Image (cartoon, rainbow, N blue to C red):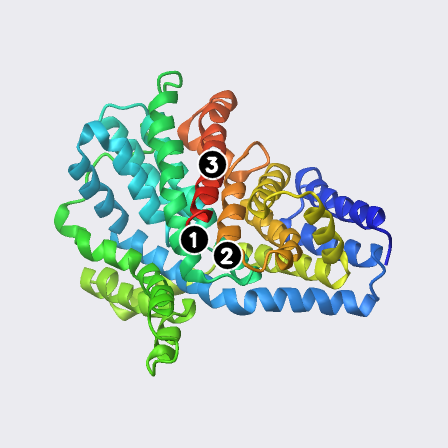
Amino acid sequence: MYDVTTMLLILVASIAMIIFLIMTVRMSAFLALIIACLFLGIATGMPLGKIASSIEAGMGGTLGFLATILALGTILGKMLEVSGGAERLARTLIDAFGKERAHWAMMFVGFLCGIPVFFQVGFVLLIPLVFSVALEARMSLAKIGIPVVAALITVHCIVPPHPAAMAITATLHADVGKVILYGLLVGLPAAAIAGPIYGNFISKWVKLDPPAHLFKTERTPDEKLPPFGMTLFTVLLPLLIMVGKTVAELYLPKDAAYMPYVSFFGNPITALLISTFFAYWTLGFARGLNREDLLKLTDGSFGPVAGIMLIIGAGGAFNKVILDSGMGKVIGAVLVSLDMSPLIMAWVIAIAMRFSVGSATVAMMTSAGIILPVLAVYPNLDTALVCVAVGAGAIGASHVNDSGLWIVKEYFGMSLTDTFKTWTASTTIAAVIGLIGTLILAQFV
C-alpha cells in the first residue's frame, strides 16, 4: 500500500474525476462513478480481477436491499398522484390553516407528499397546485413555492424510504425506524425555517407571478378526490410500521415470542409491500380503478426509477472499492486525527460533495463511503444520527450543476440571480438548520 499522502491524492483525483466527467464532459453520473471505481482500484494497486469483483459486490450489496424498496415506493407515489391524493391533502390543509397562512399549509403538503415520491416527481405533481394557491391567496409565487420545494428536498435527503436516505442507512448499518424518526424531528424545523419563514422574507424582494399557461384553472370537484384522513394514513403507513418496529424493540422484551413477527412486519420491504396493497385499495379500487388500471399504473411507474437505481448502485460500488483498496483505513485515520465531531465531519463532507457534483444522491452515497471507516472509532455513536447529518449536508449548496435548480428556475420563471436568492439560499439554510438539529438531538439520544 502507498503512503498516506499518495493514497489521499488518489482519492482526491478520483473525486475530481467524478466532478469533471459529470460537469465538463456531461457524462452520466452512473458511468462517471464506475470509471472512478476503475481508476481508484488501478491507482491503489488492486489486482484487476479484484476490482471487477469489488464493483460487482458493491452494486449487488447496495441494490439487493434497495431495488425492492425503490419499486414499492415508486408505486406508492404513483397512486398518490393519479388518485388526486396530493390535491386533497393540499386543499384540506389550506382550509385548516386559512389563506393567510397558505404558505405554511403548502410546506406540510410538500413534506407529506414528498415521503413516497422523488423530488422531481413531487415538484411536477404539486406545481399546478402551487400556482393555483398563489393566485387564490394573492401571494407571491416565492412565498408559496419556496416552502414546497424546501420541504420536498429535505424529505428527499433525510427521510427513508427515499432511495438515497435508505441507501446510506444500509451502508452505515443504521436502524431504519430511528433514521425516519430522527429525520422527521430534524427535517420539520429545517423545512419550516427554510420554507415558510425564509420564503415569506425573500418574497418581499423577489416578486413572481404564476405563468398563466401552467396552473389549473378548474378545481377538481371534492367528490372526485379521496378522503383526507384515508389519504394521510396511506402516505404515513410505511413510516408508522417501520417506526413502530423500532419503538417495540426499544421498549418490549427482546426475547418475547412475538418479537420475530414485529421484526418481520417492520422490515422496510414488508412494510412497503403492505402499504402498497393498502394504497391499491384506498387510492385505487376505492376510487373506481380496476385491476387492469392498477397493472398499467404499476408497470408505468418503474421507468423513472431506473436511472436513480443505477446511480445508487454505482455509488455503492465506489464505496466498496474504497474499502477493498485499503483507502478506507487511510481515510479513517486521517479524519479521526482532525479531532472533529463525526456528525459535523459527515455534514461537511456531504455538503462539499453536493456543491461539487450537484446530485444529492451521489453526494450522499459518496459521503457515506468516506465517513464509514471513521465510525469504528466511535462505537457508541448512533449511526442513525450520522445518516441524518449526511442527508442534511446533501440538501444544501445547490447551484448550476444541480438539475433541481434548473427545474425550479424554469417552472417559476426566475432569473438565475433570483434562483440563487430563493432556491440555493433555501437549501443551504435547510442544511445548516439540519446540522444544528442533529447536534441538538445527539445530546438527548
Towards the viewer: 223 or 257: 257
Q: Does 366 appear above or below 254?
A: above
Mark 1 residue type:
Val
Q: Secondary structure at mark 3?
A: helix
Quadrant position of residue 153: top left
* Residue occupying image coordinates x 41% and y 51%: 182
Q: Secondary structure at mark 2?
A: loop
* Residue occupying image coordinates x 23% and y 30%: 101
Q: CA distance from mark 2 to mark 3?
A: 36 Å
Q: Which residue is mark 1?
A: 445
Q: Mark 1 and mark 2 in contact? Answer it, CB < 8 Å.
A: yes
Seen in the image, is 79 located left or right of residue 438? left
Q: CA distance from mark 3 to mark 1?
A: 38 Å
Q: Earlier in the sequence, mark 1 or mark 2?
A: 2
The answer to whether residue 160 is seen in the rendering is: no
Q: Residue 88 location in percent, x, y?
A: 21, 47
Q: Residue 71 location in percent, x, y?
A: 44, 63
Q: Could you classify mark 3 by the number of other residues whose Cα lies within 10 Å: few (under 14), some (14-19), or many (20 or more)?
A: some
Which disc is residue 382 wearing?
Answer: 2
Mark 2 residue type:
Asp
Q: Secondary structure at mark 1?
A: loop
Mark 3 residue type:
Ile
Q: Which residue is mark 3?
A: 407
Seen in the image, is 410 located left or right of residue 135? right
Q: CA distance from mark 1 to mark 2?
A: 8 Å
Q: Earlier in the sequence, mark 2 or mark 3?
A: 2
Q: Nearer the viewer, mark 3 or mark 1?
A: 1
Q: Does 48 appear above or below 168?
A: below
* Residue occupying image coordinates x 30% and y 56%: 235
Seen in the image, is 192 located left or right of residue 61? left
Towards the viewer: 169 or 425: 169
Q: Residue 111 location in percent, x, y?
A: 34, 45
